[in-house]
Amino acid sequence: MRNILLGCGLLLTASVLPVSQADVLTLPAADSSASRLSLPGRGETQSAVRRRYGEPGKRHAPVGGGSAAQPPITRWDYSGFSVFFENRHVVDAVVPSAPAPLFNTDELDRAGG
């Protein structure tokens, strides 16, 4: 009798659960001009970036820097891209209008398909 009651409880619980729906994530197509843009490479110094690209349009104040585990991160904005520095070395350069390519998209395709 207990198994029957347990089975009824599971059936009742399953019938009350809402049907889930998936959201669709749409990213803009990569800008071909952005792919031709030569960005600073990881490890380049601030002085090398300044020599190659000139003065940035905007320099942001460093954030972090409270400890060795959290070094200061600085951002320089140029026309069309931004450069991020840890201390005085490039850690990344990004083009805001061109998101990074997606990897392992096979999982996404199955979810949408």
Image: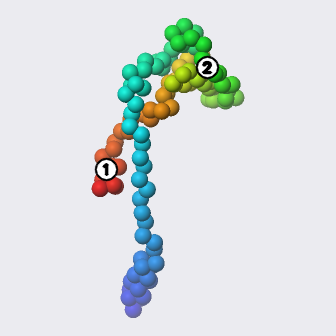
Report whether 50 appears left or right of 21: right
Note whether 89 is above or below 20 in the view shown: above
Q: Residue at (45%, 72%) from the top-left corner? A: 18
Give SS at disc 2: loop
Q: Which residue is mark 1?
A: 109
Q: Which residue is mark 2?
A: 57
Indicate how the structure is coloured in the image. rainbow
Badge 2: residue crowd in 10 Å (few <14, some 14–19, many ≥20): few
Q: Residue at (56%, 11%) from the top-left corner? A: 54
The mark total stands at: 2
Note whether 20 is above or below 14 in the view shown: above
Report x, y in % for residue 62.
Answer: 67, 25
Report x, y in % for residue 35.
Answer: 39, 25
- Locate residue 56: give its quadrant: top right
Note whether 95 is above or below 19 in the view shown: above
Note whether 11 is above or below 102 in the view shown: below
Quadrant placement of the C terminus: bottom left
Give SS at disc 1: helix
For residue 86, say whether it is visible. Answer: no
71 and 62: which one is in front? 62
**Which mark is drawn over residue 86?**
none
Residue type highlighted by circle 1: Asp
44 and 40: which one is in front? 40
Q: Residue at (35%, 49%) from the top-left corner? A: 108
- Locate residue 66: give its quadrant: top right
Sequence-first disc among 2 and 1: 2
Report x, y in % for residue 59.
Answer: 65, 21
